Every structure is written in C-alpha cells, then in structure tokens.
Amino acid sequence: MRVTVGVAGMVKPAGKTVVIVSPAASAPEAPAVKPTVQVERALPVCGTPVKVGAPVWVAAAMVMAAAAVLGAALAVAGVGFQALLRNPLADPYVLGVSGGASLAGALALAAGIGAAGVPVAAFAGALATLAALERLARVGGRTNVYTLLLTGAIFNATSAALLLFLQTFASGEELHALIFYLMGRVPVLPGWQLALVGGATAVVALLFAARGRDLNALALGEEGAAQLGVDVEGLKRTVLVGASLLTGLAVARAGMIGFVGLVVPHLLRLLFGPDHRRLVLVSALAGAAGLVVADLAARTLAAPRELPVGAVTALVGGPFFLVLLRRQGRRSVGGNG
C-alpha cells in the first residue's frame, strides 16, 4: 500500500492508496509575519495614523511632539486672553473661538468631508468666529472687553446647542467620532502640521513676550495703559488675533482640550510673578510638558482602551484649580489680617 502525504488536515481513502494529510507538508511556506504594534487607532479626526510595523518609539515620539506643540499653543493663548481680559480665570475658550472651531469641525464630520477637511473647516470656523466677535464688540471704533466677554458667552452657548442638535441626528459611527472630537484627543500629526502649529506658537509667544511691558501695563486698566504710552487698541487686536489663531489651530487638530490654558498660566503666575516677559515663555514650556503627561495618562490608565485627553485634563485640572484658588484665598485673608 502506498502512502501519500498532503496538506488538508484529514485522511482520505483513495482506492488502495491512503492519503495522510499532515500540517508538516512539503507545500511552500508562507513568509513569516513579524508581530507589530499599531499605536494609533484610526478615527476620522486623528491625523495621520502610524504605519503598522513602525517602531513603537517612532509612534510615541510623534504623539509626544504633537502633545507638546498643542499644549504650548493652548498655554500661550491662555496667557494672552488672561492679560487682555485682566482676569486670571480666563482661558482660550471664554471668547467662543473654540466653540466656533469645534462646530465647524463637527459639521465637516457630519457632512462626510473626510479627515483632511476637518482641520480646515475647524480653523475656518475659528477665524470666522473671531471676525464676528471683533465686529460685534467694536463700539465707536474701540473693542469693549465686557461686550467681548458677553458675545463670547453667547457664541459658546449657541455652538453647544447646535452641537447637541448634530449629535441627535448623527449615525452611530458619526456620533462616536463627534464625541471623541469634542472631548479632545491628541492626534499623530504629519511633519508639516507639527511645523505649522509649532512655528505659529513660537511666533506668537515671542510676539507676546516682546510686548510684555505693554501687557503688564494693561493690568492698570485701558486708561492707565494709554497714559503710559501703550497703543491699547493695537495691543488688544494683536492679542486677540494671536491667541485666537493658536486656539483655532489646537481645536482644529485635537478637539476640545480644556484647563491647559486656564491652569498653567495661573499656576506659573503664582510661582514666577506676573511679568509677561517671562510668564509667556515659561507657560509655553509648562503647557507642552503638561499636555504630554496628560496624554500619556489618557493612553495608559485604562489600556488597552484610550481615554479622551480632554476628560483627563478636566478631571485633574478642575479640582487642582479649586485647591489653588482656596490656598490663594487663604493667603489673601492672612495678608489682610
């Protein structure tokens, strides 16, 4: 009796021939597939996913670089808005610029424009919101800060209502993408986008630092700063455009990430003083480091699931900021006593 070895995982009688099928067949071996790690999961707003097979350190470095430039952008924008409004509790979202950017990005998602169209739409929404704010807040050729605050609050409320309306009619996949986008997530950015956001952040930070004396004088009020020779209207326009530009870029790429532009400048003002010539630069560095740490926590605390980094910054930043306010209030009471 003749015995033939094949590849099928079973034994078949073939007349007087018995066919024994074994995994150890002489068929050509398939090429070995190396195990790889895919760090970046694909979502419509996450930027450029890392190629499967890329070294883990490359993916990690790209994510850390994106978190650093976005954190620096939000922190510098926070310093600008707090100086402009003379309020240490102000943050980049208070004027409604982020609301307009997120609404435009969400509309792009719902319309199925695609990943490349979301940041473009969000940035266009930020610029359109800034233009509308500037026009509505100008009275007699001057930008009124309180009108600006009130208009920003109205813009935020309107944007939030429209976003809820979009979520109501979104499909399951669209709703998932919208929620992650609105809660904030650090994407993997291609090199040119890293250069764009990082370059814009560096230019605005250096511009704010160069005008640090004028920003310091603004703490005396608009009339007091004008008596010191400061072009108040030009300064306000510079801060509005620069801070809104950075906020629009950050929201366009990462969605809504709060408390970075609120907590970081306020904490560093307590540590290093209110001089904006130094405060702007140290806030940029601290904002970069802070968002890198927050994103690392978001990716590891619930692994293999990934938490939205916006939720992490809110959960950590909210209570921490309340503690800072409490301690500052106690020091003020003790000093007055």
Image: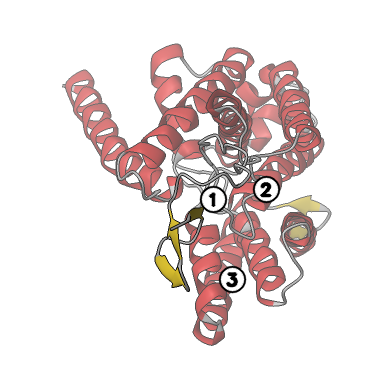
Measure the C-alpha gap from mark 2 to mark 3: 24 Å
Determine whether, in the image, residue 250 is placed left or right of residue 275. right
Residue with the mark numbered 2: 47
Check residue 301 in the rendering and tell me which mark sits there, or answer none: none
> What residue is rendered at 60% in x and 61% in y?
99
Q: Position of residue 288 (x, y in %)?
A: 54, 26
First of labels 3, 1 by sequence position: 1
- Residue 10 position, x and y percent, is 40, 64
Whole-number angstrom distance, CA of label 3 to CA of label 1 = 28 Å
Q: Secondary structure at mark 3?
A: helix
Question: In the rendered structure, which amino acid carries the disc numbered 2?
Answer: Gly
Question: Identity of the amino acid at label 1?
Answer: Arg
Confirm whether residue 87 shows in the render. Answer: no
Frontmost residue, 143 versus 320? 320
| Residue 112 to residue 31: above or below | below
Location of residue 20 (image quadrant):
bottom left
Look at the image and tell me in which quarter the N terminus lies.
bottom left
Instruction: State the mark number for residue 159.
Output: 3
Q: Is residue 326 above or below residue 269?
A: below
Seen at 79% across and 34% down, the residue is 196
Q: Name the residue at 52% across, 27% down.
A: 287
Residue count near mark 1 (Cα–Cα under 10 Å), binned few <14, some 14–19, many ≥20: few
Tag in front: 3 or 1: 1
Q: Is residue 91 above or below residue 215?
A: below
Decide which of 22, 93 is in the foreground and name it.
Answer: 22
The percent coordinates of residue 337 (x first, y second) are 15, 21
> Few, some or many C-alpha atoms within 10 Å of disc 3 (few <14, some 14-19, many ≥20)?
many
Q: Splitting the image into 4 quarters, where does residue 335 fall?
A: top left
SS at circle 2: loop
Please tell me whether mark 1 sits on a helix, a strand or a loop: loop
How packed mark 2 is, by other alpha carbons closer than 10 Å (few <14, some 14-19, many 20 or more), is many
